[in-house]
Image (tube, helix red, strand yellow):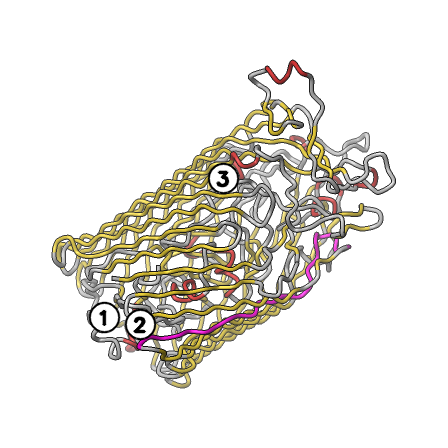
Amino acid sequence: MSNNPNSMAGIIALAAALSTNAAAQEAPAPEQTTIAVVDEITVKGFRRDYLGSGSKTAVGLDLSTLETPAAVSVISQDLLRDQQVNNVDDALRNVAGVTKFKTGNGGEEKFSIRGFDASQSIYRDGARINNALNASNIPSTETANIERIEVLKGPSALLYGQGQPGGIINYVTKRPQFEDAYGLELIGGSFDFFKVEGDATGALISDKLAYRLVAAYVNAGGFRDEVERERLLINPSLLFQPTDSLRLTVGYEYIDDQYTQDRGQVLDGDAVNGYFYSDRQDLTQFYGIPNWNRNTEAEARRFYAIGEADVVEGWRIEATYSRTDNDKTNVDSSPLIAFPNGAVIGPIGSGFDNLVVIQPRQTIGAGQTQQVTFKNFIDFEGPAGLQHQILASYTYEDFSTESTSFRGDRNVFFNVATGEYFTEFTADELDDADIFQATDTVVFGLNNRGASLNQDFREHGVNILDYITVNDWLAVLVGGRYSDFKDSRAGFEDTDFAFRGGVVLTPVENGSVYFSYSQGYTPSGGLLGIDDGPIDPQTSRSFELGGKLSLRDDQLLLTAAIFDVELRDVPFVINPFDDMGNPTLPELIRFDNVGETRTRGAEFEVVGQITDRWRVQAGYAYLDNEITSSGTGQFGVQFVEGTKLPGIAEHNFNLFTFYEFPVADGDFGLGGGIFAQSDVFISTENNAEFDGWVQTDLAAYYKRDRWKLQVNASNVFDVDYRLAQAGTNADSFAAIRTGTNAPRTVIGSIALAF
């Protein structure tokens, strides 16, 4: 919503110029601990700024950007609006070092940070919201109620427990405000896209009780044949502030997402001669079953509460609770490797020219995540005049899933030349209540395969962190976390201690240099070793050296970092084949912690206002990612030392900028962006690559008083490129899991703020 409140740090520099349109409340002085302030300042109208506020995502403390010994990227709501972002895939391309993978099997978003899969390290208001199982993954994230997106780079076990070492992604939800603000936006465009967003906030009881209600409805087609989506979001929340030292926020988020499951496309060729994207294919081809995949439905319900209180001067406590329940019917169909030499499309000249074999599938599942945190923030001056900011906290996380999977009793055939789908069936089957008829030529039944990789784990974590200010130019960060992890279904329990340290030098008032070291871990998830006991967890460590420079009175921020991140004890299969030379049955596969992967690289970002009317968000990342210890995957696939992980580009670049001109008592904005990356391998075998690409976007708007008209064109030159699947896999698997980009897309909107 274009009227949405800007975050406090991003708007403070504008408050004087916009005093007739904004109501600000003074933040407390650093030595005070009172929290009786409004976190955000509302600006009625459409003034925008890309430099997001400081966040607690990095180390959990209220530190400025220059004080933080870590790389944190913030995608502000204003940038989301300028780009007319309606999915987080497009939002995260604005962060250096973040790579988008092919969409996951369950429709969820999939990303890597610094070369490591971050798909299971996605949080909402600091609480984990997703999991590794397709059956109960959350619906794709709705952006209407996102205030900002924070990306923390590097291992984050100290605050967030188990996870991959690249970093975490945190979606921050819009909060209630005491100043009245309302807005409505209508959005429409290519491929029958339609969306309406509403946002209202204000006081219910003076300065004691405030509310916010965000709602959105989406009804859209897709550039792919047969693909469509209908989604509803409702997110009411309340802020209760009975005294200056006590504050409670509660909210409920409901998402119902009904859509066509699109598994992506396939590659031509075979395992002997190589796989490639050929002229037998195009972006519009759908490799699912018409009227079957479109029955996918995901429902998520999230309740959250955040309580804050000043105990005494220098001591503040914060308690949070979050619970997310997911129900999902994942209706799916997947191409198979069904022809000689591992071909997915029937070779020309064979008896099955142009055919693709597709397997119907369905998974019905439910999942639940709960998280409780209790934090103590203590500020005091210690011996020798050292200033301490201490975070001592306890976190409890519980996660469970239940699911049942089904497979079709026969395969479906798709002809890429004619677009026809067909199966073999009898006339009697058409009258069978257990037979599903997807089209006039496609008929099949389902066989129950039983439970599918259900999980039930909990984690307790206790951490303590001390940020010590030695003098005006030196600060030190030191901390550790003890974690106790238990997977009840796998009969696995483990403990871990993770350390984090850092040094911040501030040689000039507007610049800092930092060094940090951090550790992380990822439990084995119940994978069994040769002795039938669980294998060790994966561990990780990261070294980082960076610098930050604030210009134009804190309106423009330049950051740079070099880093070395390593993931150790990666599990690989030790018995891919049985004594007869056949692939080992899944229940008999055993693992060992023999693998390692590493990324060395550098990142640069420029964010903020170049002038009062010219804003920019730009970044570049260099990632040297490789497997540093060889291993064996299922079916005997070898992953060799020195090879690269799939989908990770060595170079990626993002630039988006906007300039405003005063026109006819209003403002005309003109902007655009360039997003690019170099070649990527399609699998860990490193035999085939997807070409690099450059995508260009354009945007323009006119705003006057409370109205705004905007148009955005994405991929204006209609560039065609492919996205790889995450994880260690073979070329043959990548050939049936290929993602594709969207073609040229035009979106228009009209918004009213009042």
Q: Quadrant of residue 745?
A: bottom right
**Residue marked by disc 1:** 22
Q: CA distance from mark 1 to mark 3?
A: 53 Å
Residue at left 45%, top 66%?
72
Range shown magenta: 665-687
Residue contact between numbered discs 2 and 1, judged by CB atoms under 8 Å: yes
Residue 324 magenta: no
Please report contact status of discs 1 and 3: CB closer than 8 Å, yes or no. no
The residue to which callout 3 is attached is 493
Residue 374 or residue 265, whichever sits in front: 265
Q: Which mark is residue 11?
A: 2
Q: Quadrant of the N terminus?
A: bottom left
Q: Nearer the viewer, mark 3 or mark 2?
A: 2
* Horizontal side of residue 388 vs 28, given as left or right: right
**Residue drawn 39% across and 50% down?**
127
Q: Nearer the viewer, residue 434 or 285?
A: 285
